[in-house]
């Protein structure tokens, strides 16, 4: 029994960890900027491409293979630094106050551009670079083999969850971000530079998406189409958890990942629809998601 | 202290304020009186930069506000308590009052000193400080919003319809509190909007009557 369930659970949690990064990025952007960023998944795949390329370079140049670890994080940071402020200050800022249809069209357009840009820069072949995973090896407990890299992913996601909570509750910037989410106009009147907060939140959202993508490369690699696939999954997770909810996104990520893993093991033909079946059921019972509230939006 | 000259504001193509001009002086309480829809709230929101102006100018101690973003007002020393309180419900009363101080990056000792000053002026807040702002009554919420505005009101304190919806006893309490602020903070100008100015008779230095977006009478 344990031999079947344990690896299943590990797969589900590791998968959940990756989805959590990207879904929380989406939900954060939505709470602060009130914009549903359809191009969010592209930042995941760009993060993955950059990290895989950097990893291939490090290994190809014969550098210390442990450098692939900082390179995963730095890749995500580079993507965030390049795209976050630029996209928010130009394209996204232009859509404020123009209605949801314009925002969706703009971010969808951005998604298409970014998809083609990735094909131009990284080509159409898949990239695979698993040095970080290989370096950590495996652990065997009771005859079951676990990938240490998966354990690391789960720990990182848990740390991020706690870290974000502390950031929002106990730092000056986090507190001001919370106030901006609750009431934009009052924020302005109380002297908060809401424009700066929007740039900050958007960039943090891009970073989390790119980090999810970068951390996924050692186990799954990266191929064209990854952005779209991730985007839909992140939407499902954010909707199930309740848009704008940190804990909601974490729990929803676990539920969706568990549904997918169960489907892969027991009914592979249902793999693709499993997350949406879960979403359907949850939204039928709780239309604002597990942790969502009808009127109040928060981080 | 604060000077408004020929302020014109248009909302959705309709002129809401027409050539509004007045001056606030330090140590004085100015009451802006008018019926619902006369443009009282719009006047305050326009000064705070929450609405675009069609024309006119506003200056505070010689600093022209026109070109500045809305969030620069707090730094200049304009404290504002909106009509509907607008507290952050899941932060505590004290956390709400601290928000403008945090936004201005006040060092901890200054934050503490200003907070103590607010508690001195508004002793009603003492027992409420740890309570979530979403859980205080409407009247208490008005005092919290006043405290939050006082945190940064170094030059001008603007209160939008503070008496609206208050039971008579609470309104009287609020009026006394306001009088205390007026007496102890002689270096700031106070602007209060009101549809029934009776409660403010005792402390009002100037009364401005606003009708359909125009100041029709100004009485010292």
Image (cartoon, coloured by chain):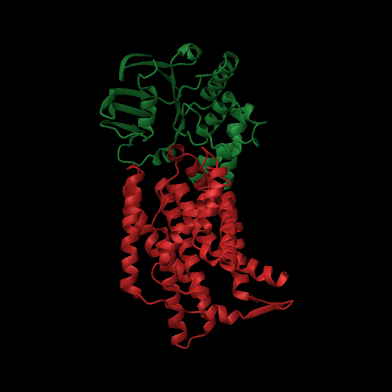
Judge whether A214 appears above or below A196 on screen. below
Q: Which residue appears at 54% of the width and 50% of the height?
A: A240
Q: Which residue appears at 50% of the width and 57% of the height?
A: A23
Q: In front: B57, or B145? A: B145
Q: Residue A237, can we see it?
A: no
Q: How many marks?
A: 0
Q: In front: B150, or A298? A: A298
Colour used to depict chain A in the structure image: red
Indicate the position of residue A221 as horizontal and vertical percent values: 47, 74
Judge whether A276 appears above or below A212 on screen. above
Indicate the position of residue B2 as horizontal and vertical percent values: 37, 29
Colour used to depict chain B in the structure image: green
- Please identify the quadrant where the C terminus of chain B is shown: top left
Indicate the position of residue A16 as horizontal and vertical percent values: 57, 62
On screen, residue A259 versus residue B203, left or right, reads: right
Indicate the position of residue A255 as horizontal and vertical percent values: 59, 57
Judge whether B142 appears above or below A181 on screen. above
Q: In front: A201, or B151? A: A201
On screen, residue A76 versus residue B39, left or right, reads: right
On the image, which quarter does residue A260 sit in? Answer: bottom right
On the image, which quarter does residue B196 sit in? Answer: top left
């Amino acid at each position: 029994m344990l031999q079947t369930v344990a690896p299943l659970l590990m797969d589900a949690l590791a998968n959940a960890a990756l989805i959590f990064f990207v879904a929380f990025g989406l939900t954060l952007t939505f709470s602060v900027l009130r914009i549903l960023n359809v191009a969010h998944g592209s930042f995941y795949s760009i993060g993955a491409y950059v990290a895989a390329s950097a990893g291939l370079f490090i290994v190809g140049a014969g550098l210390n293979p442990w450098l692939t670890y900082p390179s995963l994080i730095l890749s995500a940071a580079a993507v965030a630094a390049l795209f976050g402020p630029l996209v928010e200050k130009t394209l996204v800022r232009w859509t404020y106050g123009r209605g949801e249809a314009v925002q969706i069209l703009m971010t969808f357009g951005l998604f298409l551009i970014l998809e083609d840009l990735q094909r131009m820069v990284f080509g159409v072949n898949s990239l695979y670079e698993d040095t970080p995973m290989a370096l950590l090896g495996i652990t065997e407990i009771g005859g079951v083999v676990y990938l240490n890299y998966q354990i690391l992913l789960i720990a990182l996601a848990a740390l991020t969850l706690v870290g974000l909570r502390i950031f929002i509750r106990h730092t000056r910037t986090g507190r001001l971000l919370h106030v901006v989410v609750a009431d934009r106009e009052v924020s302005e009147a109380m002297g908060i530079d809401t424009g700066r907060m929007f740039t900050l939140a958007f960039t943090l959202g891009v970073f989390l998406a790119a980090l999810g993508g970068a951390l996924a490369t050692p186990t799954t690699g990266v191929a064209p189409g990854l952005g779209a696939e991730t985007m839909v999954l992140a939407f499902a997770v954010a909707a199930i958890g309740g848009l704008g909810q940190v804990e909601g996104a974490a729990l929803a990520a676990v539920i969706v990942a568990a549904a997918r893993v169960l489907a892969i093991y027991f009914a592979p033909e249902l793999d693709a629809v499993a997350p949406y079946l879960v979403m359907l059921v949850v939204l039928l019972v709780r239309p604002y998601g597990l942790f969502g509230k009808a009127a109040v939006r928060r981080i | 202290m604060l000077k408004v000259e020929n302020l014109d504001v248009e909302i959705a193509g309709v002129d809401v304020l027409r050539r509004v001009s007045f001056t606030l002086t330090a140590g004085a309480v100015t009451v802006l009186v008018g019926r619902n829809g006369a443009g009282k709230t719009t006047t305050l929101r326009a000064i705070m930069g929450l609405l675009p102006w069609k024309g006119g100018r506003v200056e505070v101690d010689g600093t022209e506000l026109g070109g500045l973003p809305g969030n620069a007002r707090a730094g200049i020393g304009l404290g504002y308590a909106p009509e509907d309180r607008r507290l952050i419900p899941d932060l505590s009363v004290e956390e709400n009052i601290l928000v403008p101080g945090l936004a201005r990056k006040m060092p901890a000792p200054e934050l503490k000193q200003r907070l103590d000053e607010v508690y001195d002026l508004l002793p009603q807040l003492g027992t409420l400080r740890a309570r979530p702002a979403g859980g205080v009554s409407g009247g208490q919420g008005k005092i919290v919003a006043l405290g939050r505005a006082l945190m940064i009101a170094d030059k001008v304190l603007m209160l939008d319809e503070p008496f609206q919806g208050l039971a008579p006893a609470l309104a009287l309490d609020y009026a006394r509190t306001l009088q205390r602020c007026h007496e102890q903070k002689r270096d700031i100008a106070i602007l209060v909007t009101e549809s029934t100015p009776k409660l403010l008779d005792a402390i009002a230095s100037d009364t401005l009557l606003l009708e359909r977006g125009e100041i029709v009478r100004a009485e010292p």
